[in-house]
Image (cartoon, helix red, strand yellow):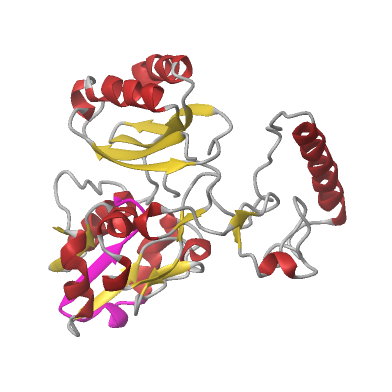
Amino acid sequence: MSNYLVAALYKFAAFPDFKGWQHPITDVCLKGDVKGTLLLANEGINGTIAGPEAGVRKVLDFLHAIAPLSGFTHKESWASDEPFLRMKVRLKKEIVTLGVEGVDPNKVVGTYVKPQDWNALISDPDTVVVDTRNDYEVAIGTFKGAVDPKTKSFREFPQWAEENKDLLMKPKLAMFCTGGIRCEKSTAYMKEQGYEEVYHLEGGILKYLEEVPEEDSLWEGDCFVFDDRVSVRHGLAEGDYTMCRACRRPVSPDAKLLPEYEEGVSCPLCIDETTADQKERFKERQKQIELAQKRGERHVGITKPPRGKSGGAAESAEAD
């Protein structure tokens, strides 16, 4: 039974007094037993929250009542287990980090394409399709024929686009991401670079998987999500991937059978990225997690990936 409502949301909007809303938003989340991450910046809001349905809906109503954020759209799904450990409302320079000054989706952005119209666009031979997500996300699923930039963070995308102009020479450029926010920024950036016919999937992969029947789908694999469900499939059903707690990357059921995988300590992707001392700390942490589980408690001592490694999402919001 799925008891936790998950709501993914974002909106680009002029939000000059965003700092003053950090504590009021945190308070309403905590009162409703809602957890997750919300990012606030001068350019708007981005995040994913989860909790009891009544609590999540109170938070959404509260956010809609904040004038600059009013009218945002969100995507809902359900989780059988609590997807987040804590509630974090963080102040940021950007709600999704492209790292290029002046890119504003409120001023210029690509053409939105409904999920029902996406297949026709990406099947057009005059269209080049680009996955704007990070490498660890693309690895578990993407659209058929999509280009993988193999970026480790979204801020690498402008350099990739500059170095691959020949690849992007087709008349139409179609871009997609998990929930739509990275597409808004990347299409705004590409329009500013002179690309004319730029499109993006409205609502992102999540909306496509929700609305397009599996028998008509051009999606292959699972979609990485930024919470403890790790991945979802068509109909937003929970996938089979788990999270490596050493590097925060998704791990398939087959990868868990390999000798490089040790629960809470390593996976085939990060086995060579951590030192022996780090692995010993991870083993001790895993021991504490298992002891907490035996007591019927939830251990929250999850560390971030080793410094400088690609890792998975440290935030519940759509990744940088």
Q: Is residue 150 magenta?
A: no
Q: Position of residue 60 (x, y in %)?
A: 30, 26
Where is residue 287? Give x, y as percent. 84, 41
Location of residue 278 with respect to 8 vertically, above or below = below
Can residue 17 be spotted in the picture?
A: no
User: With 77 as the anchor, is 195 left or right in this view?
Assistant: left
The number of numbered badges drawn on the structure is 0
Image-based side of 268 in relation to 100, left or right: right
Task: State the residue at coordinates (28%, 36%).
Answer: 43
Q: Nearer the viewer, residue 292 or 153?
A: 292
What are the residue bounds of the magenta stretch? Answer: 164-180
Observer-nearest residue: 222 or 149? Answer: 222
Viewer-side residue, 126 vs 233: 233
How far across and how far down the image is residue 117, in percent? 15, 66
Q: Is residue 132 visible?
A: yes
Q: In this view, which residue lies farthest toward the bottom?
A: 125
Q: Quadrant of residue 133?
A: bottom left
Residue drawn at x 69%, y 31% as measured from the top left: 298
Residue projecting furthest to the front? 1
Is 172 left or right of 242, judged from the image as shown? left
Is 318 located above or below residue 70 in the figure?
below
Left or right: residue 304 versus residue 82 is right
Residue 85 versus residue 213 in the image, above or below: above
Residue 86 point in image, percent of width and height: 56, 28
Residue at left 39%, top 66%?
A: 159
Residue located 51% across and 57% down the image: 239
